[in-house]
Image: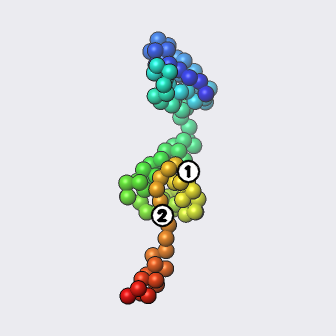
Amino acid sequence: MQTIGIKDLQINPAVLTRSLESNNYAMITKRSKPIGLAVSFNEKIIDKGLKTALMIDAYQKGYLSLGQLSKALDIHTKKALKMLALMGVNSIDYDFADDMKYMDSFL
């Protein structure tokens, strides 16, 4: 991964272009602090990366359930839970029908 300062980028934008054309990541920094990451465009990023990011955002906002998230990403629910945990996203998995059986015993 190449690191490019914002001032270097202003002076010579071709530095970023060459990095992306070589399929390398480029970390953009401002005063030595990372402010962005540039990634070369390819179908895998659009198919997997962007789709995953959008689906997780929809899950966090409550637009998708865990089941809908796993189905949209074509992965097992347990794998979706692990992915969410690794990303620091709160999630919960329970069987509603099973909960209702125990609810009857309380009533």
Residue 82 in view: yes
Question: Type of residue at label 1?
Answer: Leu
Give the class, few, some or many, for how many residues have Cα within 10 Å of label 1's Cα (few <14, many ≥20). few
Residue at 54 percent across and 59 percent down: it is 81
Q: Is residue 28 left or right of residue 2?
A: left
Q: Secondary structure at mark 1?
A: helix
Q: Is residue 79 left or right of residue 30?
A: right
Residue at 49 percent across and 70 percent down: it is 94
Residue 97 in view: no
Up-down: is 104 above or below 1?
below
- Say which of 71 and 2 sits in front: 2
Q: Position of residue 65 (x, y in %)?
A: 43, 63
Of the 4 image quadrants, the one containing the N terminus is top right
Residue at 46 percent across and 84 percent down: it is 101
Q: How is the image coloured?
A: rainbow
| Residue found at the very far front of the displayed protein | 106
- Say which of 90 and 65 sits in front: 90
Residue 92 is tagged as 2
Q: CA distance from mark 1 to mark 2?
A: 14 Å
Residue 86 is tagged as 1
Question: Type of residue at label 2?
Answer: Ile
